[in-house]
Image: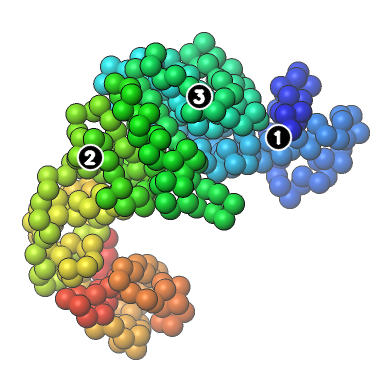
Amino acid sequence: MNDLAPLHSLLTPEGRALLDEVRDTDPAQELAVATRLRRSHPADLVSAALGQARLRQRAAAKFGAADAGRMFFTPHGVEQATRASVATYRAARLREAGVTSVADLCCGIGGDAIAFARAGIRVLAVDRDPLTAAAARANAAALGLAELIDVREAEVTDIDVAPYDAVFVDPARRGGRGRIFDPEAYSPPLSWAVATALKAPHAALKVAPGIPHEAVPGAAEAEWISDGGDVKEAVLWFGSGGAGGVRATLLPGGHSLVGRGLPDPAVRGVGRYLYEPDGAVIRAHLVAEVAEEVGGGLIDPTIAYVTGDSLRGTPYASAYEITDQLPFGVKKLKALLRERGVGNLTVKKRGSAVEPEELRRMVKPRGASAATVFLTRVAGAPAMLVGRPV
């Protein structure tokens, strides 16, 4: 069992005051700060406060400095918690569907419960780990949401979800050996989560973005979500009216691309522009929808780069103007970059075994100009495309 004493000590007036004092401690100064504080505070309390300060600094990237500076974390909780922007988006979808109460199963330190409550949804937050449940309870109180969030330490399989408008399940996807790729090896398994979801009018199941499309139940809509260009998660929605559908959503902005079952785009020669679809678009298998939107085709049947002759704006892909197309060869690329005076070189790869940093070492870029090199395949052959962002 996890030791609750350090967390409880931080919830006392002395613990809270000490947390305020060590809030902005530089890790390089931590030993000196600890030595000084142990003259007037118990050593265990000082260690707990400094450890919590480190966790809060890490959590700021997910929760924002204001919230993270008031919340309580565990190392696992920081790592596994949903980014606040993604949780807020999901909560808004449920609220728009008319949901007023949700059973948040496997709630962790409460990141999703906080988003639900802030959307005006009453939450039952459940976690079987005593320390994690205690942290979730402390976070609800710290953010003034205790009246909307009821935290319960229990096995999620023992919870009756019938009284709630919606179910949200965030199963553990990491084990002793790292990430778990088999959805049936999640804790609880995906099959249990789906069966539970089908008992409620609405449900959302958080799954790994690498989930195979064939593992998505026919009753669900599958949505892949990216934030700032990074794919964060996939969500299986039930009761949303989109059964069998797929979509890709890009945050911030909330642009959603809904699949229309288009056939694979045609392969064509490299045009003036190259479009790099967002990772969520690629995971959702919606490259064809982007190709249609920009009037383009693929450079290779197995590569998710779209090319076209005209520039068309789309939130679902980054556009680059291509200036040169070369067969793969370090000497030719090095000569071209030297001729152009390129010192600021961005290297992207898709379908190439060469690592970007390895190529940078080989070409040794020098100069004041900037360029982007794509290591890829064009019509089956290794190629290099040189260009710049539009």
Q: Which residue is mark 3?
A: 158
Direction from residue 192 to residue 76 in the image, left or right: right
Q: Which residue is mark 1?
A: 1
The type of residue carrying mark 3 is Asp
Q: Which residue is mark 2?
A: 218
Q: Is residue 12 above or below residue 269?
A: above
Q: Nearer the viewer, residue 217 or 222?
A: 217
Q: Give SS at disc 1.
A: loop
Q: Nearer the viewer, residue 161 or 390?
A: 161
> Does residue 294 show up?
no
Mark nearer the N terminus (2 vs 1): 1
Direction from residue 38 to residue 63 in the image, left or right: left
Position of residue 265 measured from the top left corner of the image (x, y, whole percent): 11, 60
Colour mode of the rendering? rainbow
Per the model, the C-alpha gap separating discs 3 and 1 is: 20 Å
At a point 39% along the width and 77% down the height, the residue shown is 354
Q: Is residue 91 above or below residue 210?
A: above
Q: Quadrant of the C terminus?
A: bottom left
Say which of marks 3 and 1 sits in front: 3
Direction from residue 170 to residue 320 in the image, left or right: left
Say which of marks 2 and 3 sits in front: 3
Q: Give SS at disc 2.
A: loop
Mark nearer the N terminus (2 vs 3): 3
Position of residue 83 measured from the top left corner of the image (x, y, whole percent): 45, 38
Instruction: Return the residue found at the far top.
Output: 147
Q: Nearer the viewer, residue 207 or 314?
A: 207
The type of residue carrying mark 2 is Gly
Per the model, the C-alpha gap separating discs 2 and 1 is: 39 Å
The type of residue carrying mark 1 is Met
Q: Is residue 136 above or below residue 210?
A: above
